[in-house]
Amino acid sequence: GANHLVRSAGIPVAMPTKSVEMQVLKRGRQTKRMVDLSEDATVQDILMKLEALSGVPSKHLFLAELRNVQKVRLFSGEAPIGNFEVGGLDTVKDLPEVIHVEHNVQLSVDQALELLND
């Protein structure tokens, strides 16, 4: 009939983002890029975005940030607290001035397999 149920569309709500600066992990002054992180965005999300933009496989990239005056490599499930550096990229000059990173809920095949094997 005409009174079929209307499924409520999953309307994406604009999540508050935080803007941080990113530069490559090298000595000296480096070009910086702004990264807009959605609320739940993780290191993994950032690496996947950088792979898409740079063509460098995410497994060759890593993020580091200063915590208590030491540079610490971040785990894929973490989120950067503030400005961070990316290892494995030569430069960020070819990347957009502002990079938007959304949280990707879908697991990659590798992650799904890892969970199955646990």
Image (tube, rainbow, N blue to C red):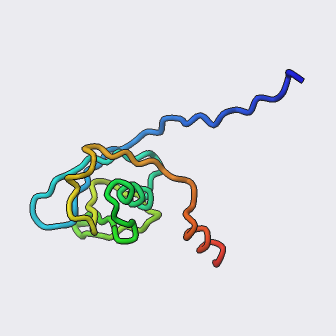
Q: Quick one: 4 or 54, which is closer to the camera?
A: 54
Which of the 4 image quarters holds residue 88? bottom left
Tell me the quarter of the image containing the C terminus: bottom right
Q: Residue at x 44, y 56 (%)?
A: 45
Residue 15, placed above or below residue 40: above
Identify the residue at horizontal 27%, vertical 46% (top origin): 96
Question: Which of the two residues, 74 or 95, is positioned nearer the viewer here?
Answer: 95
Q: Is residue 103 left or right of residue 57?
A: right
Give the percent coordinates (x, y) of residue 37.
39, 47
Q: For the N terminus, which image quadrant?
A: top right
Name the residue at the left extreme. 28
Question: Viewed as shown, does residue 95 lie left or right of 16?
Answer: left
Residue 98 in percent (x, y) is at 29, 43
Q: Position of residue 41 (x, y in %)?
A: 45, 52
Indicate whether 54 appears above or below 59: above
Residue 71 quadrant: bottom left
Q: Name the residue located 31 percent from the left edge and 58 percent from the top edge.
A: 54
| 34 lies left or right of 113 | left
- Residue lying farthest to the front in this orientation: 55
Looking at the rendered structure, the number of numbered marks drawn on it comes to 0
User: Eyeballing the image, is 12 above or below 55?
Assistant: above
Q: Residue furthest top?
A: 2
Q: Residue at x 39, y 60 (%)?
A: 47
Residue found at the very far bottom of the displayed protein: 117
Percent x, y for residue 9? 66, 33
